[in-house]
Image (cartoon, rainbow, N blue to C red):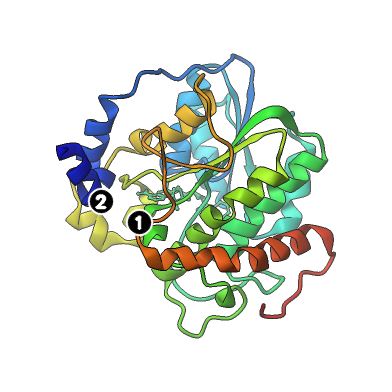
Amino acid sequence: MLNKILDASIFWSFDLSGYLRHEKDFDETYEFPKGSHALITGGTSGIGKAATLEMIKHGVVVTITGRSASKGESLLKTHPEIKFKQTDMASWSEFDSLINNIEPLDYLVLNAGGMPEKFSTNDLGVELQFASQLFGHYILAHKLSLAGKLKPGARIVWVTSGGMYLKPLDVTTIYKNDKYDKVETYANVKRAQVTLLPFFKKEFPDQTVTAMHPGWAATPGVDEAIPGFAKTMEGRLRTPLQGADTILWLLSSKKRIESGALYFDRKKVSPHFFWFTKKSEKQREVLENLLRGSVTSKVFSKQQP
Ligand SMILES: NC(=O)c1ccc[n+]([C@@H]2O[C@H](COP(=O)([O-])OP(=O)(O)OC[C@H]3O[C@@H](n4cnc5c(N)ncnc54)[C@H](OP(=O)(O)O)[C@@H]3O)[C@@H](O)[C@H]2O)c1
């Protein structure tokens, strides 16, 4: 009963105390076959880096991406077995050279994410958070699949955020947003990822596609994007590895993992806390068509949907 109340509070669920309480029910350790292959976007920092460091301990060959060459190179100094490919997830033309140089994957973690301060778009007119975290990740996964670089049975994990619980999907801001707010846009993009889970399940029938949210973890990204939150929550945030735990579990668990589902602290959870986010479902089709368009047409439409 007390656990249910604490979980419903959100605060004592997403924070460190929530992790420590939930962890008491964890009954599996991470097991990865030595020599298996993983790609982790945004593996140079925070949660992605923690997942990378854990996987290489098990002998997984991990390729990571990030925009900053210096972040990648400094990680490689201490861990030369990691493969780093400088890639901006919003710059879709960069994906081919990443894909051409990668072995068929057992694991794909779509983790890269950030919150640009101001509204800006990629070279095809798509807002940067949408371009990188949603379209970029989908295009990358799609291209990997076409190139035969996603093994049958491979596990794909989208790293979303509990921030989406407060935001119904709004597809009108993909190209233009006069009232751009970085946190609201972030929540919208994370809501989009979760709304599309049934679509991703259909798109990758030979793989298991899930999403997870990490709760609140102390990472360089949180320090930089929301410093006030980081300061207020000092001592109450999860470590990056605790934030990465459900990713690692979803990749390695021997239990039945449900494709198309959202997980938090190793449990399947609902994508909705509040009635007002359920209207997101109505816009799913618009977004599905845009994603299909992003991989079928040479020119991405700049028209507002
Ligand atoms: N920490 C939390 O409490 C929390 C909560 C909910 C969800 N999340 C999610 O967890 C994921 C990781 O976040 P984090 O907290 O670990 O942040 P972080 O420390 O800032 O790490 C983000 C990683 O993504 C990379 N990245 C950002 N934008 C990119 C782009 N356009 N293209 C390629 N790489 C990019 C960064 O490298 P470069 O800057 O060099 O590109 C970095 O490696 C994100 O998806 C975030 O939304 C985190």
Residue at disc 1, CB closer than 8 Å to ligand 1:
no
Precedes in sequence: disc 1 or disc 2 = 2
- Pointers 1 and 2 in contact (CB under 8 A)? yes
Q: Which residue is mark 1?
A: 273
For the point 85% across and 65% down, which residue is it? 298
Residue at the location (64% across, 16% down)?
A: 35
Q: SS at mark 2?
A: loop
**What residue would you read off at disc 2?**
10
Residue drawn at (50%, 85%) of the image: 178
Q: Could you tell me the amino acid type at mark 1?
A: Phe
Cα distance, mark 1 to mark 2? 10 Å
Amino acid at pointer 2: Ile
List x then y, in percent, for residue 187.
Answer: 43, 63
Position of residue 47 measured from the top left corner of the image (x, y, whole percent)? 42, 41
Q: Secondary structure at mark 1?
A: loop
Which of the pair 197/143 is nearer the observer?
Answer: 197
Left or right placement of residue 144 versus residue 210 in this view:
right
Please give the name of the residue rendered at 50% of the width and 31% of the height, measured from the top-left corner.
250
Label 1 neighbourhood size at 10 Å, few (<14), some (14-19), many (20+)?
Answer: some
User: In the shown orientation, is residue 73 left or right of residue 215?
Assistant: right
Question: Where does the image place residue 191, in percent across and percent down from the top left?
Answer: 49, 60
- The answer to whether the beta carbon of the residue marked 2 is less than 8 Å from any atom of ligand 1 is no
Q: Position of residue 110 (x, y in %)?
A: 57, 45
